[in-house]
Amino acid sequence: MPALELRGIHRSFGSVHALRGADFSLLPGEVHALLGENGAGKTTLMHIAAGLIQPDRGAVLIGGVPRPGLSPRTARKLGIGMVHQHFTSVPAFTVAENVALGAGWPVAPDALRRRVRKTSERAGLPLDPDARVDHLSVALRQRLEIVKALAAEARILLLDEPTAVLAPTEVGDLLRVIRRFTSQGGSAVLITHKLDEALAAADRVTVLRRGQVMLTGPAADTTAAQLAVAMIGEGAGDERTEPPSSGARSDAGPLVRLEGVDVAGEGELGITLRAASLTVAAGEIVGIAAVEGNGQRELLRAIAGRIQPLRGRRWVTEPIAFVPEDRTTEGLIPAMTLTENVVLGSSSTEPWIRGRTVDWRTAEARTAALLEELAISVPGPWVPASSLSGGNQQRVVVGRELSRRPSVVVAENPTRGLDIRAEATIHAWLRRAASDGAAIVFYSSDLDEVLALATRIVVARRGTLIEAAPGATREELGALMLASG
Amino acid sequence: MVGAAALLAGLTVLAAGLELAGYDSGTALGALWSGAFGSWYALTSATLVRAVPLILIGLGLALAFRGGAFNIGGEGQFYAGAIAATWIGLSVGGLPTPLAVAAVLSGAVLAGAVWVAIPVLLRVRFGVLEVISTLLLNFVAEALTSLLVQGPLQESQRIYPQSDPIAEAARLPLLPGTRLHAGLLLALAGAVLLHWIFARTLWGFRLRAVGLGPRAAEIAGRIDSRWMTALALALSGAIAGLAGGVEVAGVSYGLFQNLSPGYGFTAIAVALLGRLHPFGVVVAGLLFGALEAGAGAMQREADVPAVAVYVVEAVVILAVLLSESARRHGAAMLASLSSVAPKAPG
């Protein structure tokens, strides 16, 4: 008998038919990967299992018992723990306080600390109970989310894109923890859109596409190609394997030149970048390979002119296109329309800037033309950015930045959280910008993306830059990234 | 639409409350209506006169809120403006009217800006939340007013805690036969100007961007968000100061305690009810002006305490906020699921 079963789930939001008769079952002790493009309905389906959303039609069975009108509270009592993509801890509270809040434990300081420490260590997720959450790294915050669910005695973990924020080694740790949890009788759903991860980590896989189940079966009997086809239809994944283009042009001088630049660490994961020197020529795509928090962010923001270096020399040819990591807080303003978001990133030389006023009609026409050119299919330039899927939001950000005919393109994790198709589009655009003569510098937490896109790879480790040998393999790069000292 | 329904709800709750308390709700509501709109005089001299400060302060607050600054100190800045206007108004008797009025109003603007400069500096230098600093400075401004009208600004006969009347030359022209002054034109022109700023200018766009997404404004728009928010806060204080000056030059002709029946606070509701849109602020200001005007008549004619009208105001605000949050909830839900329906690209 499945630990969790969803039968014939339908759910619409307004005119959007999010789920169309989706079936899903989770067996006791298994890790079940739920795959799909952005917007395929994965999160909605799991929200229904956790009682956060009610289905229009269909049944939710927990431990074989139908649970009509399931509430989040009941779901939690029945052992369902959801780890959301967006963290749900109180930043100003300590780890212990957050666990108490999540699990409904009494806040008796010493006993609570001991209890939290025990729970986290037993799960293989050690955490300092006294650490304040806003001082934790992203990986540790996620760990806390899982510990919260376990503290509430979850027997079924629903993890929404847990690996999106993690470095490769951290992904391995997380998957081991999930294994440990299931070997003790728990069951887990791993929402992801990374094919390899699903195949490596899961016992079974289910692929959703536009609210319907396209494929479900044991991971061992499934190939990555089958999954890709199920996710996005025939002809998938071709663009991904396209080899990097030729690289630097000898005729042009460097468009980016840093010499002995120091940059102060930024934010919680910040680390000071020391004595960084980097030269990028027109047509080059330099990929920065690094584990999160090794100075790559400081490097990119210093190149993009978003942070002032402490010392050193910086020559970067304007205009600079900058694609920040977090598209919804730094790349665009969700509450504003697409036109407004395009105007936001534009310089004063754009045709819609008339002195101190904005000619919105021109701006809207240009935005519509841009959307058309980039083949971003949306109702129109007047819709708010929040109404777009993550992939389309990123297309808008990247498209806006590239439409300024930049000399230099700086991109942080340009395809994080995107599906294969959006990723292929963004890669194609960056390559085209390079072949049009721009210098590209990007960072990705996905080493495969660095390998696929870069013509030259630089490793950032503890705030210093190391040039990787041409043709370095994944393993060699990994060793460089993680080497100590 | 929502506004009308909210108003109806507010009036219904008021009527029910009055009936329960043993009043004749028919008489009371009739008095409320006639006090606000019952005659030309009621409309101009009661409703519109009260609407002017609400609209002016409300416009300033809309500017601040749009720019991400939460100015709760409209009341204090209003008093600062009124103090400066009185001070200047007492000593410009020799000037021609346009000059005298200009001196009074610019003094008021400056005073409002100076009063809000403290919260601005505290925010920029030390990160002190302006919600708290502006709120607290309200009490300081009220206390300062009360000190001044019993001290340096007290009338020459030294009987009442109020100032002498300001010079004739410093007074705003009136609509003949009414108490309605030219401040209304100022408020309406201000609304049009602010609308143009929001809708057409690059500065107004950047201000809105900072309010809606300060990080994105900085990173993608290369806008100095902190400076922009500080400027919005300063301007809103200046406008509230102007409202204080207009009140002195157009209505009270002098300073006294309780010059404002809480205009600075009611204007927060006016700005929110008007959805931070300048024309919305005008409509909301007129509505609240009418309610406050009617409240007086209700007290005189039906013996219902004027504060009862706050029930209507409160219900209107709650109803609008509820509908707003319901809408946003729906929108957020749709947004989180819009990812669910990707339009097939290519």
Image (cartoon, helix red, strand yellow):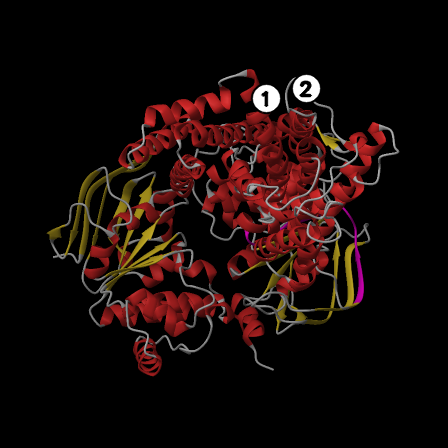
Q: Position of residue B243 (x, y in %)?
A: 67, 37
Judge from the rendering whether residue B85 lies leftward or rightward of residue A85; answer left or right.
Answer: right
- Kind of residue at badge 1: Thr
Against B179, is A419 above or below? below
Whether residue A355 is visible here, answered yes or no, is no
State the extent of the magenta-drawn residues as a range: A312-326
Callout 2 and callout 1 share a chain: yes
Please identify the dominant SS of the magenta region.
strand
Please, what secondary structure does the residue beneath circle 1 have?
helix
Against B218, is B345 above or below? above
Q: Are marks 2 and 1 in contact (CB under 8 Å)?
A: yes
Q: Is residue A324 magenta?
A: yes
Task: Tell me the chain of label 2.
Answer: B
In the rendered view of the protein, which quadrant contains the N terminus of chain B?
top left
Return the residue nearer the eye: B286 or A218. Answer: B286
Task: Tell me the chain of label 1.
Answer: B
Q: Which residue is mark 2?
A: B175
Q: Which residue is mark 1?
A: B44
Q: Residue at x 22, y 72 (%)?
A: A184
Kindly indicate the quadrant of the structure image that contains residue B325: top left
Q: Position of residue B86 (x, y in %)?
A: 74, 42
Judge from the rendering whether residue A341 lies leftward or rightward of residue A210; answer left or right.
Answer: right
As measured in the structure, the alpha-carbon distance from the residue carrying label 2 to the one carrying label 1 is 9 Å
Q: Position of residue B91 (x, y in %)?
A: 83, 40
- Which label's residue is closer to the chain start, 2 or 1? 1
